Image (tube, rainbow, N blue to C red):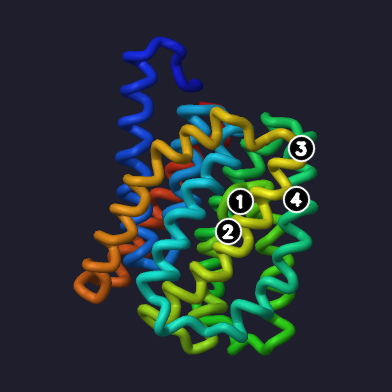
Amino acid sequence: MTAASDPADFAGVLALASAAAFALAWLSAVAGFGGGVLLLPVFTVLFGLRVAVPLLTVTQLASNGARVWLNRGELRWPIIGRFAAGAVPLCVAGGLLLARAPLAGLQRLLGVFLLVVVLWRRLRPHPRTPGPRTFTAIGAASGLGSALLGSVGPLTAPFFLAAGLTRGAYIGTEAGCALLMHLSKLASYGSVHLLGARVLLLGAALTPATLAGAWAGKRTLGRVSDRLFVLLVEAGLVGAAALLLIGW
């Protein structure tokens, strides 16, 4: 399914996408992960995968930018710098690959990826404390995966937590790393004509809902159970994976 050409139908699609963007930006601001990964299947159903990945990047740019600003006093800049050293060049490479990758294969790969996310978090919820070089390697893997699959936040979350980051420091630092990846991806997508007027207009239309969700999540942070959010996110990941694997 892709966005309809009829104005009334498109308005309905845009309203649904805005609601999803708000809810999942709120989720990311509270739990620190999950929003982008869950939003990609929604965008894929509504707009098609080739539009969904760059569109997710545009909306996540706003979401992560807001989270960086809201938590600016708690950012861990050395971690952001090490992560970016690995992430930026691989983001560019992944963006170039996306323009030529087969859509059906990418959609199934995304479904498998979502299942791996859940399995990884179950098997390795508390990895060893990562060193400086580890974050560069994590950044490289994240950059490639993010450029092809939209978001890899749930896979990297355990490493940020293992570095001792909590609450605002974790939310802001992880968002800072993601923000640099999204900027690199946008440059790469633009160079291969994946960042057209349609994507930019949709991104602009969804930005208010995304910013509102990030603000609401910041207000909620600290008042909810982390365990409940993890369970809800993982259930959503498994459901989204099933839909992608069966080709819905």
Task: Give the residue drawn at x 60%, y 56%.
Answer: 182
The disc labelled 1 sits on which kind of residue? Phe
Residue beneath disc 3? 192
The disc labelled 4 sits on which kind of residue? Gly
Q: Considering only order in the chain, which callout, 4 or 1, is on the residue closer to the N terminus?
A: 4
Relative to 145, say whether 4 is above or below.
Answer: above
Residue beneath disc 4? 94
The disc labelled 2 sits on which kind of residue? Val
State which mark lies toward you, 2 or 3: 3
Residue 2 seen in the current view? yes
* Separation of residues labelled 1 and 2 (CA atoms): 9 Å
Q: Do residues under tags 1 and 3 come within 8 Å of each other at their CB atoms?
A: no
Task: Give the residue drawn at x 67%, y 52%.
Answer: 185
Residue 94 is situated, as x and y percent measured from the top left of the image, at: 75, 50
Q: Considering only order in the chain, which callout, 3 or 2, is on the residue closer to the N terminus?
A: 2
Mark 3 closeness class: few <14, some 14–19, many ≥20 residues within 10 Å: some
State which mark lies toward you, 3 or 4: 3
